[in-house]
Image (tube, rainbow, N blue to C red):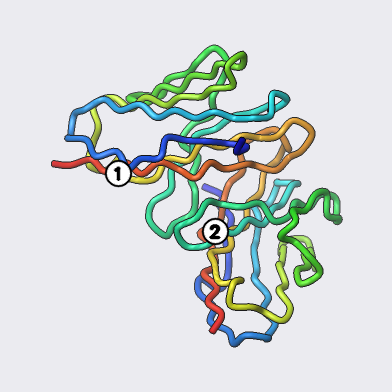
């Protein structure tokens, strides 16, 4: 099983759509969870951290289910500028290295 | 806003040559990292560095690679005897606490020819 596994994508959605990304992780001892965004040939940038209670930042909502080892990201009212690759990232239990999923490409169409 | 800076942005080198990739982490951060991303693939961990020593390294980080913090601000990755398969984006990252998000530099695109 991959350490961090994401939806394969790509996701092609119209402007204004709601889109959800899912991610699972294999290490139950993982401590911290993040969604990063990566534009083409650019560095990963933190979108939001993910907390057990769930958290929201504007149009973005992240959820964590520790029992199922499952993380999600919901984007409401998609904008053209949301087009990017969304990376599910997990911080290992006994380590400080970030483990990245392969990413899911989102293309928002006008 | 403080940021991680990397130089050069693009480096082309001949196979077998040595390269040094440079990074200036965010000034009050204590943990430093190198990651790489081969074109079309996922971001992979190479090495973490804390308190002037390597705290963890991946299988990729073999004897060909070394890291150094030569002064109070720079953090370097040296790749000896480069191979074609070393061509990738190399990202430096830092954070203030090992359990928090890491901030990434804009990357160095290494092309080995």
Residue placed at 54% from the left, 84% from the top? B113
**Quarter residue A93 falls in:** top right
The location of residue B69, given as percent across then percent down, is 79, 63
* Callouts 1 and 2 in the same chain: no
Q: Residues within 10 Å of mark 2 (few under 14, many from 20)?
A: many
**Mark 1 vs 2: CB contact within 8 A:** no
Residue mark closest to the camera, 1 vs 2? 2
Residue A64 falls in image quadrant: top right
The quadrant in which residue B16 appears is bottom right
List x then y, in percent, for residue B111: 53, 77
User: Is residue A75 rendered to the left or right of residue A29?
Assistant: left
The residue drawn where x is 70% and y is 43% is A97
The disc placed on residue A83 is 1
Q: Residue A52, percent across and down?
A: 57, 15
Q: In this rendering, would B14 be left or right of B73?
A: left
* Residue B9's disc number: none
- Percent across and percent down for residue A60 are 37, 26
Return the residue at label 2.
B37
Query: Is disc 1 placed on a helix, strand or loop?
Result: loop
Residue for point 60% across, 38% down: A2
Residue found at x 54% / y 24%:
A50
Residue positioned most to the left: A110
Residue in front for this viewpoint, B70 or B39: B39
When the figure is inspected, residue A41 is found, relative to residue B7, above or below; the finding is above
Q: Is residue B101 above or below residue B9?
A: above
């Amino acid at each position: 099983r991959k350490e961090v596994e994401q939806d394969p994508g790509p996701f092609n959605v119209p402007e204004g759509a709601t889109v959800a990304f899912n991610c699972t992780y294999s290490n139950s001892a993982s401590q911290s969870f993040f969604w990063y965004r990566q534009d083409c040939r650019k560095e990963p940038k933190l979108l939001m951290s993910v907390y057990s209670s769930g958290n929201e930042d504007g149009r973005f909502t992240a959820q964590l289910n520790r029992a199922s080892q499952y993380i999600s990201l919901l984007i409401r009212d998609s904008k053209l500028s949301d087009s990017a690759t969304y990376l599910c990232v997990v911080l290992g239990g006994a380590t400080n290295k970030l483990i990245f999923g392969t990413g899911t490409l989102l293309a928002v169409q006008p | 806003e403080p940021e991680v800076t990397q130089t050069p942005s693009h480096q082309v080198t001949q196979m077998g040559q040595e390269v040094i990739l440079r990074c200036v982490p965010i000034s009050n951060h204590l943990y430093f990292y190198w990651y790489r991303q081969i074109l079309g693939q996922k971001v992979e961990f190479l090495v973490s560095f804390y308190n002037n020593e390597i705290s963890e390294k991946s299988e990729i980080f073999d004897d060909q690679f070394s890291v150094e913090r030569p002064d109070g601000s720079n953090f370097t990755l040296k790749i000896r005897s480069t191979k074609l398969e070393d061509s990738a984006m190399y990202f430096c990252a830092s954070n203030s606490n090992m359990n928090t998000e890491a901030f990434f530099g804009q990357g160095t695109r290494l092309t080995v020819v």
